[in-house]
Image (tube, rainbow, N blue to C red):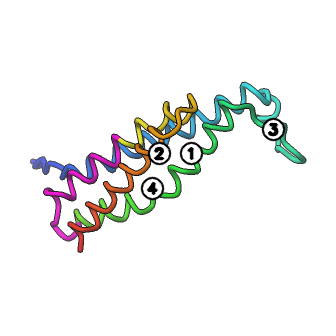
Amino acid sequence: MDSFIPLSTELALLGWSVVLLLVHVALQGQLATAERGLGWNAGARDGEAKPLGPMAGRAERALKNFQETYPAFVALALGLAVTGRTGGIGETGAWLWLVARIVYIPLYLFGIPYIRSLAWAASLLGLVLMLIRFL
């Protein structure tokens, strides 16, 4: 008989972070394809690509921004789980990082300044809280 071992919150949020990554990739891909065409997307993409418009460009930059902090989130979530240091401010930090990264997407897509920067700063604070718990 298999016994069910519940995941720590940090590991569950790690799973949801993969969903968020897929949302980023799909959103960026769909917006770029809408602007550059299906032939471009299906092709080898040799040569210069047509410049992206505002929405597709923002989606691409938002994805790159996500990718800059995502490895740290993965490392910290796994580190907290492996060392048994889940919970506390590490869990709070993981939630803060994920929620802030979700909020960041529409703020960036719609070009909302300052609040977008606050969302980014909140996600960074989440990583710092996780790091404090880890160390």
Q: Which mark is residue 49?
A: none
Between discs 3 and 1, the one toward the N terminus: 3
Q: Which residue is mark 4?
A: 70
Q: Which mark is residue 51?
A: 3
Q: Nearer the viewer, residue 59 or 34?
A: 59
Q: Which mark is residue 117?
A: 2
Residue at image coords 57%, 40%? 25
Q: Position of residue 98 (x, y in %)?
A: 35, 45
| Residues marked 4 and 1 touching at CB (< 8 Å) | no
Residue type at mark 3 is Pro
Alpha carbon distance from label 4 to label 1: 10 Å
Alpha carbon distance from label 3 to label 2: 25 Å
Q: Is residue 99 left or right of residue 59?
A: left
Magenta range:
82-99
Q: Nearer the viewer, residue 48 or 58?
A: 58
| Residues marked 3 and 2 touching at CB (< 8 Å) | no
Q: How many marks?
A: 4
Alpha carbon distance from label 3 to label 1: 17 Å
| Residues marked 2 and 4 touching at CB (< 8 Å) | no
Judge the density around disc 1: few (<14), some (14-19), many (≥20) Cα neighbours within 10 Å: some
Between discs 4 and 1, the one toward the N terminus: 1
Task: Pick out the residue farthest to the front.
Answer: 114
